[in-house]
Image: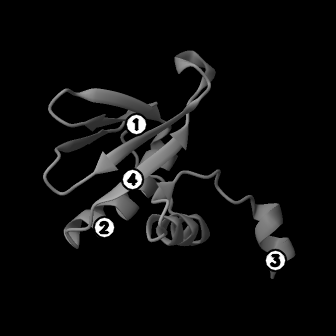
Amino acid sequence: MGSLIYGTSSIEIEFDDRTLEHLQIVIATKLRRRESFFFSWRDTQKVGDGRSSIWLDPGIPLYFKYSGGRVPTISREWLAELTTSSNSSSGLVLTDEPSLDNSVKRK
């Protein structure tokens, strides 16, 4: 499991490396444009099985810590879904990666 470490209070949010890589791409794109936005995800049972959100702003430090040394392959479809979400009024909402079966059915 990798981690997104947020702000000077060092709030640590765990995601698997593949998810974290996709989030880093979307978040970095928004912050490079100096755009602030909410990021929301579903919590694991380990931390209460609820839902959490943070406000992301170019002035708030972020640190992406990966547990593995390999860069995961990128799903263009998932990246597009996350990017579209990040541009909505709700902000970036983490969704599950689209399965290959769903991709094939949609074509």
105 is higher (above) or lower (below) than 23: below
Residue 93: x and y in percent read 53, 54
Q: Please indicate, yes or no, whether residue 14 appears anywhere in the rendered image.
A: yes
* Residue 78 falls in image quadrant: bottom right
Residue type at numbered disc 1: Gly
* Residue picked out by circle 1: 68
- In the displayed structure image, the side of residue 55 where residue 39 appears, left or right: right
Asked whether 65 or 26 is in front, the reply is 26
* Residue picked out by circle 2: 30
Gap in Å between the C-alphas at discs 3 and 1? Answer: 32 Å
- Indicate which disc, 2 or 4, sits on the residue closer to the N terminus: 2
Gap in Å between the C-alphas at discs 2 and 4? Answer: 11 Å
Gap in Å between the C-alphas at discs 4 and 1? Answer: 27 Å
10 Å crowding of disc 2: few (<14), some (14-19), many (20+): some
Residue type at numbered disc 2: Lys
Gap in Å between the C-alphas at discs 3 and 2? Answer: 28 Å
Residue at 69% over, 60% down: 98
In the rendered structure, are the residues bearing label 3 and label 4 in contact, judged by CB atoms less than 8 Å apart? no
* Residue picked out by circle 3: 106
10 Å crowding of disc 3: few (<14), some (14-19), many (20+): few
93 is higher (above) or lower (below) than 10: below
Gap in Å between the C-alphas at discs 1 and 2? Answer: 25 Å
Residue type at numbered disc 4: Phe
Residue 30: x and y in percent read 30, 67
* Residue 22 falls in image quadrant: bottom left
In the rendered structure, are the residues bearing label 3 and label 2 in contact, judged by CB atoms less than 8 Å apart? no
61 is higher (above) or lower (below) than 99: above
Task: Provide the secondary structure element on which disc 3 rests.
Answer: helix
Residue type at numbered disc 3: Arg
